[in-house]
Each structure stands twice: as structure tokens, then as C-alpha cells.
Image (cartoon, rainbow, N blue to C red):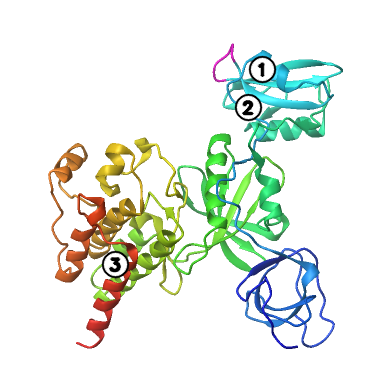
Amino acid sequence: MSVVQTPWQAGTECVANYDFQRRTDQDLPFTKGEVLTIVAVTKDPNWYKAKNKVGQVGFIPANYVQKREGVKAGTKLSLMPWFHGKITREQAERLLYPPETGLFLVRESTNYPGDYTLCVSCEGKVEHYRIIYKNGKLTIDEEAYFDNLMQLVEHYTNDADGLCTSLMKPKLMEGTVAAQDEFSRSGWTLKMKDLTLLQTIGRGEFGDVMLGDYRGSKVAVKCIKNDATAQAFVAEALVMTQLRHKNLVQLLGVIVEDRSSLFIVTEFMAKGSLVDYLRSRGRSVLGGDCLLKFSLDVSEGMEYLEANNFVHRDLAARNVLVSEDNIAKVSDFGLTKEASATQDTSKLPVKWTAPEALREKLFSTKSDVWSYGILLWEIYSFGRVPYPRIALKDVVPRVERGYKMDAPDGCPAIVYELMKQCWHLDPNQRPPFRKLREQLENIKTNLLYQ
């Protein structure tokens, strides 16, 4: 079979929709849900040459696989597209008109702040059921209790259980797309039956991070079961579907099968966060070449984000992970947005965030460059907390008056100069990541020939 150019180019990822058994020695067998990479296209449009995760190569039928696509930027995904927030009883009834038995939505309670109301169309009228919080759980009848709204809706979809009708059809909030449907359409859903959760390896603001086994490979799994944080993680997963680079932690897929929980599955980074790696090994183990390599790895990942118009907004050594083979990869894309988006600054880490981002909510690649300068300082100080011996409340005033941290002990002068370029108070004077990467490569080259 000779190779020709078609829309599915070499390097395209696809996911299997069916099992495929080898028919000839040249075929590549696979199972439903397996992720494959196109190696080459063939003269026959019905077949591709592909490889699997262990590097085996062979021919696969085109109609057995689905191309993996990034979820379109700007898509408003929701795990709870039936949740309409703060609307009145009258507005809910208008939204559920014309009456259709089983049509429903959930709103915030107007009479009982902090509670919710389930509104259901039934036999020509709308019934309103108060959902109350009791001992940290949600309930309508004080008999069945749920951790979150997704579990509650799932339950009453399967069984009316005292309601006038079971929940048959969600009234979607205008402009939203059901996250489950969109992840499935774009080829990013994984099956829970293929995942085994092994042990907790971390706890974040939003939920546990667990070591898992997915089809024989170690993976990291973020487990989210809370309504508010689930929506934040949908946003993170959406961003991750659009990013693919060797120095960014790679999304493998999401699991949203029962609407009561969300799992984000990523590649497993065996050596943990960069800040912990630096602190636990220190100068006696890590030489200058290793520190320079980590600095270069991060600059390459950030150059990719820069080129694709994404701003990370939370770059720090704690949000960089280290793989088994010592590759540093940028992770935690929870705050990552297109460059034009605004951001609430209340949750941002002061010591890592550029002055204009804190002061005026002006986020850009240039504010990421500032954070990268702080990260360089962390690397060369072996994981020290920035601005040592300066009270947190004094950091911003001093920085805005032009204060810059001293070079870490043993840091090459040429690397310290890069840090200071990143900390220019005028964002336009900071170098782009492309330039930073080039300068670090020059430093690496010069070291090799010394």
C-alpha cells in the first residue's frame, strides 16, 4: 500500500469504537476504547497504518476508529446543563412551557438561600420540590440522601420515588452543552470498567488524586464528586483536550458515566511535583545540567502554550511534574484560559503572580513569563519558597518599587540575568518564551563545549 496525503495526517490520535481482530499478519488488533496513533495513510481510504501504546504497528480499518479532537474553545460545557442558577419560580415555569411531562430543571431556592428547588412539568402543571441540605447531604424527602445534585438527578431519572413523575428530559440552560455528550463526541470518554483505582497519591483543593491502572498502564486520576468543583474540572479537561506537547502533562480521557462523579485521567508522573523533587534531592544529587534541563523543559511547554494563545495563570514548581525518565511537564490547567479571558484574582498565589495581574487582572503570556522567572528561582534554590524573610503583605509593595530577589546560592550569573528579564515591571519588556528557550539552549550549548 503506498502512502498519500489525506485529512487524517500522521500523528493524529484516534480512539477505537469497536474491537478489531487481526485478519492478516499486517493488521494491528485492538479493543474498544483503545487509543491509537496514525503513522501513515494509505491509498485505500478505508485503511490507516497506526501504532498502539506499546509501539506495535499495523493496518487498521478506518470505520472502526474515531478521530480525537480538541473540544472547541469557547464551548460552554456543563455537567449540570439543567441547572439554571438564580431564577424565580415564575421564570422556571415559563422555561418549562409548553408543558411536557418529565421536563425538568433545577434552580437555586429563592425562599431558602443555600437550598435548591427541583421544578418538574407533570400533567400540564409545574411542581416545585425543595431540595434541602441536611448534615452535608441533599434530600427532598429526608429518606434518600445524595452527595450532590448530579446524584440526585440521576436517582430521580431512574425512579420517580415519590415525585409526580420521573425526570425524563432536562431543560438545558441556554448556551450550554452537556459535558458528557461533548466529551463523547470528540473522542475523550473512557470506560470505568477499564480503570482500577489503586491508592491515593495526593489531595488537592478539588478532590483526591489517585494512582490508577488503565488497561495495564499506570495513570493519575483526579476524582471529583462535588458540584462546584466538578464544573471547574470540566473547564480544565476542556482545555487539556486542546493541548498536546511533550512538556505538558497529557490528558488521556474523562469518565462521566453515571453523572454522579467525574474522573480526569492523565499520564502518571512517577517522580511527583518538581518542588518536592528539588527539595528531597538537593545539591548533593542534582547538578547544574539537571537544573538547566528542567528549566528548558518548562520553557518548551510554555512556548507551546504561548504559540497557541493560552495563558496558564498558575505557573509554579508545585504545578510542574517530573516523569520516571526525568522530564519536567507543566500541569494543573485549572486556571488556564485563552489569552482574552478575565480572571478572579482572589485565589491567585501572590508570590508567583505578576504585579499587573494582581493589580488590574491583566493576564497574558507576559504574566506567565513573570511566573516563569519565579519558577527559575525555585529551581536554582532547590525548592525554597520565594521572597524568603519577607512578610506576604510586604511582597507586592516592595516588588512594585522595583525589588528583585537575589540570585540563589550557586546560580550561574547568566541564568540570574534571565530571571531579572522575566521580572521587568513593564510586561512589554519581558522576553517571550521562545526567546527564553533559545537563551537556555545557548547556555546548554556553551556548557557542553567548556
Residue hosting label 3: 436
- Please name the residue shown 49% across and 42% down the image: 206
Q: Which segment is the magenta one?
A: 110-114
Number of marks present in the image shown: 3
Location of the N terminus (image quadrant) = bottom right
Residue hosting label 1: 91
- Mark 2–mark 3 Cα distance, whole angstroms, equals 45 Å
The amino acid type found where label 1 is placed reads: Gln
> Label 2 near label 1: C-beta < 8 Å?
yes
Which structural element holds mark 2?
A: loop
Which structural element holds mark 1?
A: helix
The amino acid type found where label 3 is placed reads: Leu
Pick the residue in front: 315 or 325.
315
- Mark 1–mark 2 Cα distance, whole angstroms, equals 10 Å
Residue hosting label 2: 84
Query: Is residue 333 visible in the rendered structure shown here?
Result: yes
- Please name the residue shown 32% across and 70% down the image: 437
- Mark 3–mark 1 Cα distance, whole angstroms, equals 54 Å
